[in-house]
């Protein structure tokens, strides 16, 4: 009979091994879908990443990890979950079963125990992170069997392949690096630019769930904008009109040839004048200049994000072949 118990430090090596074994087929599927170049850029060392992620999870104070142990006292499954007491929102961050034990009900037992623990902790909703490709189909079926459904708002990942890595970027008139004097003005109009997005979220989620997911969206979004545009490791550019910033874009670049357009906003009073598209195109050209091979951007599929999606599409971005399929269950 399978025993489910809390994770112990002595389980780390076995959990890492079973996590890699359980996900190997999924990552092989991902490589086939993306192709070698994109996969190697996005997942240059996925096995080490899984081990590092497990270490991060098991050391987190607001994260709980449980393992399933078989009759031979061997760890054969693991589930990781988080819970926010203040909002009642919880997450199944990961669930994995060793391939030799799959089909024996281990995953169902782990999920059932995790949901019971979260319910006892006061969780009102539980979200789970899966993606829409064959490697995650087993997890999606398991979640659906426990009453999970696709969340109303889903992330949308877009990307564009660099055509001329290393080619000098031509900076459009009006585009310049951000400076300290721009920060608070960018935060103010950035909040207004995202107001329609959060109104869209509230309409889709309903007020009861929305206030749990976004208990104080203005404060959290302002903090995020300020942090992003002042991060010394990233690049932030503004589009200036009449001597004042009217839009900004933040670009992150890694060591594996992948850049991320982390944040883009245009002052609502200036929208509709091509500022967003100009910043998008320049951000892509700047990434090419830095010899990035791929540029990625995350948006969402709701109406509030529709203008941003259109801007990215006009700049040549297209949906990635694998997207998130976030699941949610009310307890």
Image (cartoon, rainbow, N blue to C red):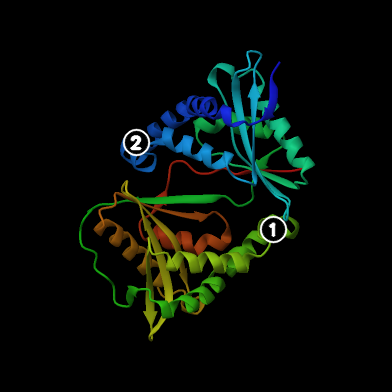
Image position of 75 (left or right of 122): left
Q: On the rendered structure, is 216 left or right of 161? A: right
Question: Residues at badges 2 and 1 in contact (C-beta under 8 Å)?
Answer: no
Compared with 203, 49 (above or below) is above
**Residue located 75% across and 57% down the image:** 208
Kindly indicate the quadrant of the structure image that contains residue 79.
top right
User: Where residue 195 sits: x, y (%)?
Assistant: 59, 69
- Asked if residue 116 is positioned above or below residue 255 in the image, the reply reads above
Query: Quick one: 129 or 20, which is closer to the camera?
Result: 20
Q: Position of residue 89 (x, y in %)?
A: 70, 50
Q: Residue furthest left?
A: 167
Q: Quadrant of the C terminus?
A: top right
Residue pointed to by mark 1: 210
Q: Residue 275 at what x, y percent from top left?
A: 40, 72
* In the foreground, 185 or 309: 185
State which tag comes first along the sequence, 2 or 1: 2
Whole-number angstrom distance, CA of label 2 to CA of label 1? 38 Å
The one nearer the camera, 218 or 160, is 218
The residue to which callout 2 is attached is: 35
* In front of the other: 134 or 55: 55
Secondary element type, mark 2? loop
Q: Residue at x 76, y 48 (%)?
A: 124
Mark 1 lies on a secondary structure that is helix
- On screen, residue 289 versus residue 321, left or right, reads left
């Amino acid at each position: 009979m399978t025993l489910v118990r809390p994770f112990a430090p002595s389980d780390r090596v076995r959990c890492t091994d079973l996590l890699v074994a359980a996900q190997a087929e999924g990552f092989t599927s991902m490589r086939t879908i993306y192709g070698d170049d994109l996969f190697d850029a996005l997942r240059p060392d996925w096995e080490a990443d899984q081990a590092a992620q497990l270490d991060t999870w098991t050391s987190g104070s607001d994260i709980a990890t449980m393992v399933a142990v078989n009759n031979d006292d061997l760890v054969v499954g693991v589930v990781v979950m988080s819970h926010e007491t203040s909002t009642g929102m919880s997450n199944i961050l990961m669930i994995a079963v060793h391939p030799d034990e799959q089909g024996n009900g281990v995953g169902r037992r782990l999920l059932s125990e995790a949901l019971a623990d979260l319910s006892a902790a006061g969780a009102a909703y539980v979200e789970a992170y899966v993606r829409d490709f064959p490697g995650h189909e087993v997890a999606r079926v398991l979640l659906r069997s426990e009453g999970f459904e696709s969340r109303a708002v889903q992330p949308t990942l877009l990307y564009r392949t660099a055509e001329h890595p290393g080619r000098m970027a031509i900076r459009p008139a009006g585009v310049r690096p951000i400076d300290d004097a721009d920060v608070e003005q960018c935060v103010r109009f950035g909040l207004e630019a995202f107001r329609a997005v959060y109104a869209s979220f509230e309409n889709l989620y309903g007020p009861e769930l929305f206030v749990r997911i976004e208990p104080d969206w203005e404060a959290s979004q302002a903090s995020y904008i300020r942090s992003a545009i002042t991060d010394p490791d990233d690049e932030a550019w503004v589009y200036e009109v009449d001597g004042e910033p009217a839009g900004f874009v933040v670009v992150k670049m890694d060591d594996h040839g992948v850049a991320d357009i982390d944040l883009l906003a245009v002052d609502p009073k200036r929208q509709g004048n091509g500022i967003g598209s100009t910043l998008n195109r320049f951000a892509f050209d700047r990434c090419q200049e830095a010899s990035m091979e791929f540029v990625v951007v995350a948006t969402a599929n709701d109406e509030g994000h529709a203008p941003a999606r259109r801007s990215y599409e006009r700049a040549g971005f297209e949906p990635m072949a694998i997207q998130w399929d976030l699941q949610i269950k009310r307890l």
